[in-house]
Image (spheres, rainbow, N blue to C red):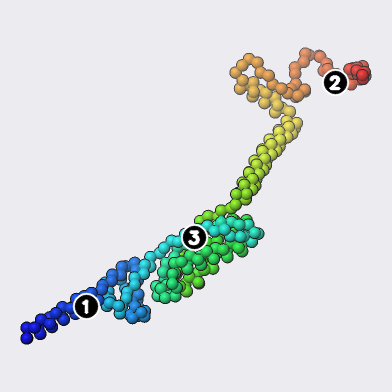
């Protein structure tokens, strides 16, 4: 009888130990995680990285990854202030600043953060015209961050940075902007050509005035060309009287031509 009693007691102890082993579980919280301990469904606090025991259905330990994450916001059509539809996409980087709020204040804080960022970029783009959005593209990211930071902080999400990835325009607007840029570049090229021609004309005018004030410079220029030439014949154009020609002693200079009726060419009768 005593042996039977002892066998029953041992069986009960073995069953209890087996039940206890199955009920007690160990959860590892890594260094990049934070653990939230729940007891009978109620949050009782955070636990630091390490190995922590939990007891069956009475206690629960949830580990939450708190490393910084990147979330891409795909392009969505947004109307600008002047009624133009443009697709704007961005990239946001965030970190879980308050694990308790992230778990208890929202059912899915990641999806909520995505939707809040979508609303933020819409609000920022709607304030400006298309030209203003293109000119201040680098300012859209910080503005979106300011608009949504408070709403994300309420669910434990700390927004680190927001950058606009792309601004896509409709096809007809792309062609129109390409035409504008082409016309602008052609105008700049024409302006540069006009400046070059003006500079060349100004140089010729200055040279003409210098030669008029100093006739001897043209003779020096002719001598310079003759010295640089390696041939026997040099053809050099110069106006009449610019280069004095030698005359025989006692010769009189030729009289200037006088325009008289006798020297004029006869006019042809009209048919």
Q: CA distance from mark 2 to mark 1?
A: 136 Å
Q: CA distance from mark 2 to mark 3?
A: 90 Å
Query: Residue 111 at x, y = what percent?
Result: 46, 66
Q: Disc 2 marks which residue?
A: 256
Along the polypeptide, which appears first: circle 3 or circle 1?
A: 1
Say whether marks 2 and 1 touch (CB < 8 Å).
no
Is residue 87 or residue 167 the one in the foreground?
Answer: 87
Above or below, 165 relative to 98: above
Identified at 70% across, 28% down, the residue is 217
Secondary structure, mark 2, is loop
Say whether marks 2 and 3 touch (CB < 8 Å).
no
Q: Residues within 10 Å of mark 3 (few under 14, many from 20)?
A: some
Query: Residue 108 at x, y = what percent?
Result: 44, 69
Is residue 41 or residue 99 the one in the foreground?
Answer: 41
Q: Quadrant of the N terminus?
A: bottom left
The single residue placed furthest to the bottom in the displayed view is: 1
Q: Disc 1 marks which residue?
A: 20
Q: CA distance from mark 3 to mark 1?
A: 48 Å
Is residue 51 or residue 233 the one in the foreground?
Answer: 51
Above or below, 24 relative to 195: below
Q: Is residue 141 left or right of residue 12?
A: right
Q: Please tell me whether mark 2 or mark 3 is closer to you in this view.
A: 3
Q: Quadrant of the C terminus?
A: top right
Identified at 61% across, 57% down, the residue is 85
Q: Quadrant of residue 198?
A: top right
């Amino acid at each position: 009888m005593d042996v039977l009693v002892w066998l029953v007691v041992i069986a009960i102890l073995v069953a209890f130990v087996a039940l206890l082993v199955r009920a007690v579980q160990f959860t590892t919280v890594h260094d990049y995680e934070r653990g939230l301990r729940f007891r009978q469904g109620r949050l009782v606090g955070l636990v630091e990285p390490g190995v922590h025991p939990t007891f069956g259905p009475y206690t629960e330990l949830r580990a939450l990854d708190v490393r910084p994450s990147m979330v891409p916001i795909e392009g969505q059509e947004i109307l600008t202030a002047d009624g133009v539809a443009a697709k704007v996409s961005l990239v946001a980087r965030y970190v879980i600043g308050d694990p308790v709020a992230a778990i208890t204040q929202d059912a899915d804080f990641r999806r909520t953060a995505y939707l809040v960022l979508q609303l933020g970029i819409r609000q920022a783009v709607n304030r400006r015209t298309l030209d203003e959005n293109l000119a201040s593209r680098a300012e859209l990211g910080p503005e979106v961050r300011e608009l949504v930071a408070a709403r994300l902080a309420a669910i434990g999400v700390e927004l680190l940075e927001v950058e606009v990835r792309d601004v896509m325009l409709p096809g007809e607007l792309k062609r129109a902007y390409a035409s504008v840029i082409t016309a602008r570049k052609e105008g700049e090229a024409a302006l540069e050509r006009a400046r070059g021609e003006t500079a060349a004309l100004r140089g010729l005018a200055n040279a003409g005035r210098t030669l008029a004030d100093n006739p001897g410079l043209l003779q020096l220029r002719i001598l310079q060309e003759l010295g640089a030439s390696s041939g026997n014949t040099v053809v050099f154009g110069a106006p009449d009287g610019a280069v004095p020609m030698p005359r025989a002693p006692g010769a009189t200079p030729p009289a200037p031509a006088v325009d008289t009726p006798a020297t004029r060419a006869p006019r042809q009768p009209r048919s």
